[in-house]
Amino acid sequence: MKVTITVPDEVHEKYSSYLRPGDTLESHLAKVLLANQDRDPKDRTIVITSETRSQLEAILHGGHLRDEADLLAKVSRLSSIEIGHVRLNPSPAQMEELKRRAEKNGRDPQREAEGVFAKMSVMFFKTMYGGS
């Protein structure tokens, strides 16, 4: 099926300047649509600038973001703490408090979380099983 779209000249010139030699804006748009054909058109898609992407990559401490699965994994890792085989998912406010306490005590957040977790374990077992 052939579809014709109309775009302003300045939009055509802007995007055409980034195309590979021999590509046309029409062929590029067709490739983009084909690459996304398995997505639900009603999906909420987020488009970010290169600057925002670079900022996210710096915040997530994991190099370049490869794809949405990579972004999800890095955010998940940053938003939780794993101690032993236990994964804790503190709220953003709790994570900020943990970071603040870690800085105050001269430790990294993981070490601070392990200390808090150790204290919680002792309190838990004292409560459950009695003792001092």
Image: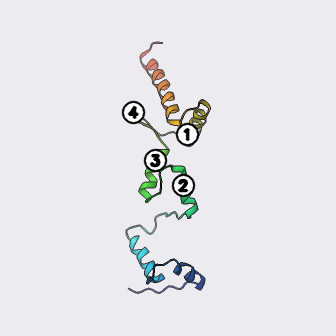
State which mark lies toward you, 3 or 2.
2
Question: Label 3 amino acid?
Answer: Ser
Q: In the rendered structure, which disc, 4 or 2, sits on the residue that comes first in sequence?
A: 2
Cα gap from disc 4 to disc 2, whole angstroms? 28 Å
Q: In the rendered structure, which disc, 3 or 4, sits on the residue that comes first in sequence?
A: 3
Q: In the rendered structure, which disc, 3 or 2, sits on the residue that comes first in sequence?
A: 2
On-image quarter of the N terminus: bottom left
Image coordinates for residue 122, horizontal then vertical, percent = 46, 21
Question: Label 4 amino acid?
Answer: Gly
Cα gap from disc 1 to disc 2, whole angstroms? 18 Å
Question: Label 2 amino acid?
Answer: Leu
The label on residue 84 is 4
The label on residue 56 is 2
Label 1 sits on a secondary structure element that is helix
Query: From this viewpoint, which residue is outermost toward the front?
Result: 21
Whether residue 84 sits left or right of residue 106 in the image: it is left
Q: Are marks 3 and 2 in contact (CB under 8 Å)?
A: no
The residue located at (57%, 33%) in the rendering is: 102
Question: What residue did someone put label 1 on?
Answer: 95
Image coordinates for residue 84, horizontal then vertical, percent = 39, 33
Q: Are marks 4 and 1 in contact (CB under 8 Å)?
A: no
Q: Is residue 7 above or below residue 90?
A: below
Q: Is residue 103 above or below residue 75?
A: above
Cα gap from disc 4 to disc 1, whole angstroms? 19 Å
Question: Label 1 amino acid?
Answer: Met
Label 2 sits on a secondary structure element that is helix
- Observer-nearest residue: 28 or 47? 28
Image coordinates for residue 85, horizontal then vertical, percent = 38, 35
Quarter location, residue 41? bottom left
The label on residue 76 is 3
